[in-house]
Amino acid sequence: MKTVKKVCIIDDDPVFVFGAKILLRKNDFCSDVKVYKNGKEALEHIMPGGEENEDAPDVIFLDLNMPVMDGWEFLDEISKLSKIDKKPIFVVSSTIDPKEVQRIKSYDVVHDFIEKPLSKEKIRLLKDKLKTAEK
């Protein structure tokens, strides 16, 4: 994976989004963060041109519980498409249900599960995972 420039956060919680944007920028994770409040809105913006789309992110942070189109529905839709499956999707959720975590990891498009809240240490580990994945 090349340097992360664009990150897409798909989450309807303004407190999480605010904190995540600060953490990502302060820890030099990326230079641009796009936020979508649900999966439908994200699909409409990041998918029209596939990989050629200038809004296509390098990494996606996805919440599960949202209105309109939740994270599960987003994963189902994105799994049908071939152009974005190489983009790392990290499900960021407060779920502690082992069955849900297992279900999350069953999606080929999901790179990993991150338990909320996001922290400086989790960002550092994430950067390390992405560097390892590019080798």
Image (cartoon, helix red, strand yellow):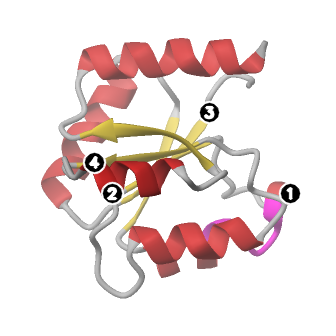
What kind of residue is marked 2?
Answer: Glu
**Of the image marks 3 and 2, the number of the one nearer the N terminus:** 3
The image shows residue 118, relative to residue 39, as above or below, that is: above
Q: Nearer the viewer, residue 78 or 13?
A: 78
**Of the image marks 4 and 1, the number of the one nearer the N terminus:** 1
Q: Which numbered disc covers residue 52?
A: 1
Considering the numbered disc 2 on the image, is that residue within a helix, a strand or a loop?
helix
Quadrant in which the N terminus is drawn: top right
Q: From this viewpoint, is residue 104 visible?
A: yes
Indicate the position of residue 120 as horizontal and vertical percent values.
26, 17
Residue in the image at 69% along x and 21% along y: 133
Frontmost of labels 3 and 2 is 2
Q: Which segment did they paint magenta?
A: 45-50
**Residue under circle 4?**
98
Quarter assignment of residue 84: bottom right
Residue 107 within the magenta-colored segment of the rendering: no
**Residue under circle 3?**
5
Frontmost of labels 4 and 1 is 4
Q: CA distance from mark 1 to mark 3?
A: 15 Å
**Residue under circle 2?**
100
Q: CA distance from mark 4 to mark 3?
A: 32 Å
Is mark 1 in CB contact (under 8 Å) with mark 3? no
